[in-house]
Image (cartoon, rainbow, N blue to C red):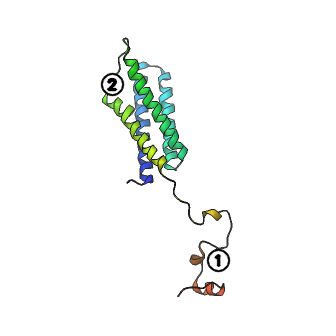
Amino acid sequence: MVASGDSAEVVRVLLLVQAAAGLLASVGELLLMGSPLYAVFPIVKAAVLVVLANRIVRRRRRALTVTIVVQCLGLLGVWFGVLLGLLPGLAPSITLVGLLTGVALPVAVIVLCARLVAQRPPAPPAFAANAGVWRVPGSPDSPYAGVWRSEDQGERAGVGVAR
């Protein structure tokens, strides 16, 4: 079983690869079509993917959900393009790279994000319930009571120290 930190890093790398592939494809589209309007959507999508990748590594659960939605929309766009290609005047261009970046990569990201969403968040430390309360490091109710005191300070404070 892969740890959640490792899965989050894998999702981050996959999203960055997908953003880079989209930007590379938009450069080719710009060169062939000549209009900068073709680059607007890929640049926005790449920016969104980079932001989501960084949020996922920072353990933002909402970013996982948004990533799943964005990837599902991308898959829907691929299948919509295939269906449009069945019309008599249009021809679908199905390539290996298109299948990898348009189908396999989003499916892998969806599976990994779904696994991360299904995992329970890690339990907070035992002293997190009183994190807003200021405590003197030497007080008996401090979570670091044994760390901050030496043996003779513990005896003076009335706290029994095991020897």
**Residue 74 located left or right of residue 145:** left
Which residue is found at the position 59% from the left and 73% from the top? 144
Mark 2 Cα-neighbour bin, 10 Å: few <14, some 14–19, many ≥20? few
**Residue 61 located left or right of residue 100:** right
Which residue is found at the position 44% from the left and 52% from the top? 4
| Residue 147: % across, % down | 56, 76
Q: Is residue 150 above or below residue 38?
A: below
When asked about the image quadrant of residue 112, the answer is top left
Question: Residue 37: which disc?
Answer: none
Please say if the residues under marks 2 and 1 sit with CB atoms less than 8 Å apart.
no
Q: Residue furthest top?
A: 89
| Residue 81: % across, % down | 41, 22
Residue that numbered label 1 is attached to:
140
Residue toward you, 92 or 28: 92
Residue that numbered label 2 is attached to:
94
Q: Secondary structure at mark 2?
A: loop
Mark 1 Cα-neighbour bin, 10 Å: few <14, some 14–19, many ≥20? some
The number of numbered badges drawn on the structure is: 2
Which residue is found at the position 52% from the left and 54% from the top? 121
- Amino acid at dot 1: Pro
Which residue is found at the position 33% from the left and 31% from the top? 97
Residue toward you, 120 or 34: 120
Q: Residue furthest right?
A: 134
Q: Residue furthest left?
A: 96
| Residue 3: % across, % down | 42, 55
Q: Earlier in the sequence, mark 2 or mark 1?
A: 2
- Amino acid at dot 2: Ile
| Residue 72: % across, % down | 46, 33
Q: Is residue 81 among what the camera can see? A: yes
Instruction: Give the Cα separation between the discs numbered 2 and 1.
Output: 69 Å
Q: Secondary structure at mark 1?
A: loop
Q: Is residue 43 above or below residue 65?
A: above
